Amino acid sequence: MDVSRFERDTAVEPIADGRYAGAIDPGWAVIDGAAPNGGYLMALAARAMRDPVPAHPDPVTLTAHFLAPPTVGEVEIAVEVLRSGRRHSTVEATLSQAGEAKVRLLGAFGDLAAAEGPSRVDRRPPELPPLASCVDFTTEHERRAEAGGFPPPPIAQRFDHRMPSAVLGWTEGAPSGRGHIGGYLRWRDGSEMDTLGLLVVADCYPPAIFDAALGDIGWVPTIELTVQVRARPSPGYLAGWFTTEAVTDGYLEEDGEVWDASGQLVVLSRQLALASRPRR
């Protein structure tokens, strides 16, 4: 059985009781050579966190506080199961590098295939234009790079991103001012999306603040990110939509929702981040 790039780059192995070894791959950075994407770090840690609770493989909710940016290379993940019940296991973890804590996580894991109970969803999937009329975001940026422009972020190259042109005005210096971004996406290598992969999807788009018309915004580091996974996704393109509606003294929220190809809500997310001006 072939191992997908995502599985390979989030692989962990136990090295002692409650301790796991993994490695950060450079292909998940938000800027080439810079810190890795926060959702990728959550998925790497979550793979270790679910290992001691095999009856509960899905991260139903996971919160991460990002203490310091890690670098490419080996990491250690310390995992503690706080409680394991019939429906959920509560697990905490610390992702460290060279003895320094980089990310602290707390999550509830369950089995979404066995979930049952009342359902009501008043939200609706984002109103996106047909897939064929969207911009192939990653391929387009690769073409621009070949012509001397900036290459796409490494993490963008892990996805097949199809975005409406209406949310990409900021790439031409003409943001809409609404603070919205989204579109269709799937793994670029065609591999199946699972609930660990959804943690990355919840943080894989360019920041919605880029569309907010607030002037030059450079780095947007995440302080805290919470991802709720509501269901295992069906095959096909996902539809994601992310918004920033409150920016106060450089702090911003980004709210997200992700729907699968069958129209099922699979993710809700919220993060707190900083809007940083480019260094001159």
Image (cartoon, helix red, strand yellow):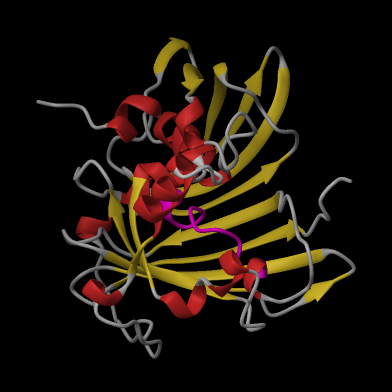
Name the outermost residue toward the front.
147
In the image, 219 versus 151, the foreground residue is 151
Q: Position of residue 40 (x, y in %)?
A: 49, 40
In the image, 95 versus 78, the foreground residue is 95
Name the outermost residue toward the left.
1
The residue depicted at 28 percent of the width and 55 percent of the height is: 186
In the image, 249 versus 87, the foreground residue is 249
From this view, report whether residue 9 is shown above or below residue 60. above
Decide if residue 216 is in sight here.
yes
The residue depicted at 31 percent of the width and 83 percent of the height is: 129
Q: Position of residue 58 (x, y in %)?
A: 34, 48
- The quarter in which the N terminus is drawn is top left
From this view, report whether residue 71 is shown above or below residue 21. below
Name the outermost residue toward the bottom.
122
**Magenta-span inclusion, residue 136:** no
The residue depicted at 46 percent of the width and 50 percent of the height is: 144
Q: Position of residue 227 (x, y in %)?
A: 51, 58
Magenta residues, as a range? 198-209
Q: Position of residue 20 (x, y in %)?
A: 48, 18
In this image, 170 relative to 136: left or right?
Answer: right
From this view, report whether residue 16 is shown above or below residue 129. above
In this image, 163 relative to 248: left or right?
Answer: left
Q: How many marks?
A: 0
The residue depicted at 58 percent of the width and 71 percent of the height is: 255
In the image, 82 versus 180, the foreground residue is 180
Decide if residue 241 is in sight here.
no
